[in-house]
Image (cartoon, rainbow, N blue to C red):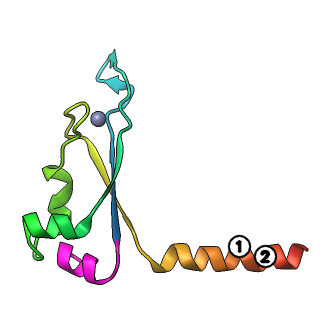
Amino acid sequence: MIETLGEAWSAGWRLKVACAWGTRDGLKSVRECGRRHDVDLETLIWTRGRDFPLSLLQERLRCPTCGSRRVRVGFVVPDNPAEAAVRSVGSARRGA
Ligand SMILES: [Zn+2]
């Protein structure tokens, strides 16, 4: 179970964040922001420390473009994309 920045970094995870400022704010219609960023985990560890819990990350982030605190946090676990790539190569060969 990976729960801290240090553990995620050691496991080779990558961190992606996206501004979740949507098209609606209550009843008002607002402009969508949609800013995305690939966060460097090592930089985050230099500033927050290895023991910083992943669960607290979301509430500490803020979009630099619109200033929204509605930020989605996603981790890319290295094993999964690799497996998916291998599988799609396999099925392409079968098709040819
Ligand atoms: Zn934004």
| Residue designated by label 2 | 91
Q: Secondary structure at mark 2?
A: helix
Taking the spot 73% from the left edge, 76% from the top edge, the residue there is 89
Q: Quadrant of residue 74?
A: bottom left
Whether residue 44 sits left or right of residue 28 in the image: it is left
Q: Quadrant of residue 96?
A: bottom right
Q: Quadrant of residue 75?
A: bottom left
Taking the spot 32% from the left edge, 18% from the top edge, the residue there is 27
Q: Dividing the image into four quarters, tell me where ligand 1 lies.
A: top left
| Residue designated by label 1 | 88
Give the quarter of the figure containing the N terminus.
Answer: bottom left
Q: Amino acid at mark 2?
A: Ser
Q: Kindly identify which numbered label has been placed on residue 52.
A: none
Q: State the CA–CA distance, disc 1 to disc 2.
A: 5 Å
Q: Is residue 90 visible?
A: yes
Locate residue 19, reporting x and y percent. Answer: 32, 41
Residue span colored magenta: 1-13
* Residue 54 belongs to magenta span: no
Find the residue positioned furthest to the top: 28
Bin the neighbour count of mark 1 within 10 Å (Cα to Cα): few under 14, some 14-19, many 20 and up.
few
Residue behind label 1 places its C-beta within 8 angstroms of ligand 1: no
In the figure, 1 relative to 40: above or below?
below
